[in-house]
Amino acid sequence: MINHIKISNVICLASYIVLIGLFLVSCKSTTVNIDTISASSSLSPSNKYKLLELDAFGNTYLLTNKNVLQKFDENNKLLFEYSFNRQGQISRVDARNPQKILVYLQEFQNIVFLDNTLSVIKTLNLESLGYWAINNVALSNDNFIWIYDPNVHQLIKINENGQRVLQSNELIQDNISDAFVTRIMVDNNKVYLACENQIICFNQFGQFDKVLPLVYDKIQLFNNQLLFLKDKTISRQSLKVEYLFEENDVIHTSTKALIGFKLSKEGKLFLLEAAGLTHTQL
């Protein structure tokens, strides 16, 4: 009788331990799932971002210091991401067409096109298409590709097979300095080459228009205006005239150092700081 009671107690104790174990495993699993949802629903404070872009629908694209491109909605919810760790460092992202996002990896001269889920559509290698040492590219308004070829000093529009659609005159023959092109920008059917100390302007057919002075690194073209960051202040300059707006025509002054900024067509100003992304309505 005593042995029977002891065996029964042992069985009950074992069952109790198993139930506790199952409960703890269940709690652990729930915690992992909650953490995963939390991490994928907002900007991660563990990431450091170095590039900001916008598309036509108000989505933001951030490039982490680990070479991961992330897409967020207007509430900073992470929608998709794509890692370029094995493909070289990203030097340019053009997200104006959210269905055909252009990513340029200058080190290997590769252009990667992504769809709206950041899935690869197509990859092009400029060297294999006959272009060398291209340091910057951009998507044209008609979904071709603008490149600047420093070897022949020309702005060139190509298709996805590398065939020339349009090209400018050789700038060097027109006594136009084309020192290192840092960015190609498209705005209102015009194309702009941002160089070290100037902007070279072209019409939609790739023909030279004029040269404007440039003394700021972080800039954005927006409706025939040049937005620029100086210290912690974002101001603007008209591209229709060649002088600055009045000094009090400042669109924003930040209390923190800015890594980058973008203004949307709805007047929402996105500010990329070391701590993350914020925005304000102008």
Image (cartoon, grey):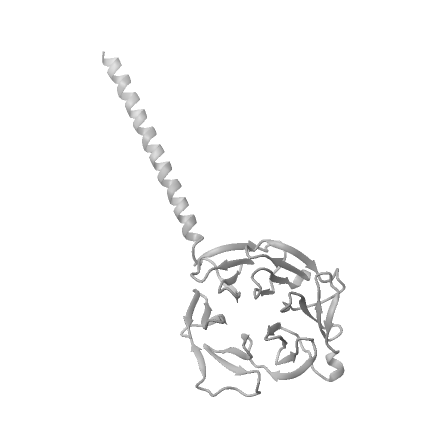
Q: Nearer the viewer, residue 33 or 145?
A: 145
State the image coordinates of residue 118 (x, y, percent, origin top left): 56, 55
Q: Residue furthest top?
A: 1
What residue is rendered at 65% in x and 64% in y?
106
Residue 4 falls in which quadrant of the image? top left
Residue 112 falls in which quadrant of the image? bottom right
Image quadrant for the N terminus?
Answer: top left
State the image coordinates of residue 219 (x, y, percent, origin top left): 54, 75
- Taking the image as shown, residue 165 lies to the left or right of residue 217, namely right
What residue is rendered at 74% in x and 78% in y?
169
Image quadrant for the C terminus?
Answer: bottom left
What residue is rendered at 54% in x and 79% in y?
226
State the image coordinates of residue 22 (x, y, percent, origin top left): 36, 33
Image vertical order of residue 31 relative to residue 274, above or below: above
Q: Nearer the viewer, residue 205 or 18?
A: 205
Count of all numbered marks drawn on residues in the image: 0
- Taking the image as shown, residue 213 lies to the left or right of residue 19, namely right
State the image coordinates of residue 43 (x, y, percent, origin top left): 44, 59
Residue 210 falls in which quadrant of the image? bottom right
Image vertical order of residue 71 relative to residue 173, above or below: above
Q: Nearer the viewer, residue 101 or 136?
A: 101
Q: Residue furthest left?
A: 1
What residue is rendered at 76% in x and 82% in y?
173
